[in-house]
Amino acid sequence: MDVISVIRAKRDGKALTDEQIDWVIDAYTHGAVADEQMSALAMAILLNGMTRAEIARWTAAMIASGERMDFSTLTRPTADKHSTGGVGDKITLPLAPLVAACGAAVPQLSGRGLGHTGGTLDKLEAIPGWRATLTNSELLATLESAGAVICAAGDGLAPADKKLYALRDVTGTVESVPLIASSIMSKKIAEGTGSLVLDVKVGSGAFMKTLDDARELAATMVGLGNDNGVRTVALLTDMSTPLGRTAGNALEVRESLDVLAGGGPADVVELTLALAREMLTAAGLPDADPAKALADGSAMDHWRRMITAQGGDPDAPLPQARERHTVHAAASGTLARMDAYDVGLAAWRLGAGRAHKEDPVQAGAGVEMHAKPGDPVTEGQPLLTLHTDTPEKFPYALAALTGAYAIGGEAAPQRCIVLDRI
Ligand code: URA
């Protein structure tokens, strides 16, 4: 087999054979296919697409490039959630202990933020002492004791994807349904969860800007999951405006704690409960009542156990940024919109996110929103507070926010958070 014939086949719009796919993924993982050759192939896939059979085989080859985890020793059914990424998307933080409190085991292998979207591990690392990296036996022990674990995926899980995703990130080949679906699902299937709920984001702050594109991605991933024995459903959810009132690491932990304490912003609570119900149904626990577990403190109890098991101090004060800058409303009226992408970009420029994989993030940096679309605002009231340790970043964050919001007579009609289910 030679790589140039594989690249040419996809460049010319042909479907790759099983043998070509198995060979190219294995050869790339072991260094026999060079990065420049794989990036040519990724671009050909982005431009010409893949059949369903090709996507299934590509996913299987990426799973086979590494180890598969096994949760069969657990007494509880496993349920996992994956979000395609958004701004202010702290849902995993309250959701994992909530679903654990309702009787499922939640192995939540998560990632770090890149670009304008935040990463779950960066948020949790704002908690003093908390560790993202666990051995497989620590992961299983935490699942047993706390019912939920949120940690980094080990290097052995789908190593082909690790290499390919880093390459796609720097070659303009991320936005391809076959490549995104196979990337996400190879990791989730290798992780060994029995059921999976996908939160596919749609809107300015998401990868998928339109409902049609999001539906195609969701249907492809749901098909891959179910064909591989993972009960999979997807919710398509709105990401035109940030979730909740904060975007930034410690700021989002604080907001998640409000939800676990029975309060918190209505949209975060609504989406957390919607995803919890889907996870519990997929795990065979349809009668569990997640609203009760939020209200009676059992979700908070599982949070405390989970954070403690991973070295964190659930009672330690969360870090705060050294400097703040408040933006005031220039007029009175209704907040008509608050754009997710622009707020995410501002939080990133303030230091909440990273430009390169190895960059550090600031725990306290981010954007706090004092109003949500549809809220009445009065001229001169605080609208946004920017937080950072590096105040020289304020002008860049403010520039990102110039067109982010509008105050008008009428708010755009309120969009439901859950737009569709597949
Ligand atoms: N997340 C992933 O894990 N892979 C992608 O390709 C896109 C988002």
Image (spheres, rainbow, N blue to C red):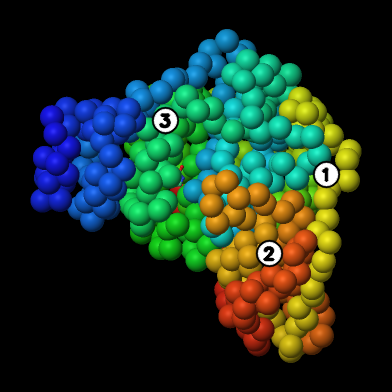
Q: Is residue 210 left or right of residue 74?
A: left
On-image quarter of the N terminus: top left
Mark 2 lies on a secondary structure that is helix
- Counting from the top left corner in percent of width and height, residue 294 is at 77, 40
Mark 1 or 3, nearer chain start: 3
For disc 1, the marked residue is 261
Q: Which of marks 2 and 3 is nearer the N terminus?
A: 3
Q: Where is residue 90 in the image (x, y as percent from the top left)?
A: 66, 49
CB of mark 1 within 8 Å of CB of mark 2? Answer: no
Q: Which amino acid does label 3 sit on?
A: Pro
**Point 12% across, 46% down: residue:** 8
Q: From mark 1 to mark 2, how far is it between C-alphas?
A: 28 Å
**Percent x, y of residue 88:** 64, 56
Disc assigned to residue 30: none
Q: In which quarter of the image is residue 313?
A: top right
Q: Residue shown at 21%/42% (left/top)?
A: 51
Locate the C terminus and report the quarter of the image it occupies: top left
Residue 367, image x, y percentages: 71, 64
Q: What residue type is labelled 2?
A: Leu
Alpha carbon distance from label 2 to label 3: 32 Å
Residue matched to label 3: 159
Nearest to the observer: residue 98 or residue 304: 304
Query: Is residue 230 visible to the viewer in this orientation of the structure?
Result: no
167 relative to 298 in the view: left or right? left
Circle 2 residue = 350
Which amino acid type corresponds to the residue marked 1 in the rendered image?
A: Ala
- Which residue is at 73% across, 24% downward? 146
Q: Residues within 10 Å of mark 1 (few under 14, many from 20)?
A: some
In the image, is residue 415 above or below residue 171?
Answer: below
**From where the camera sits, is residue 196 visible?**
yes
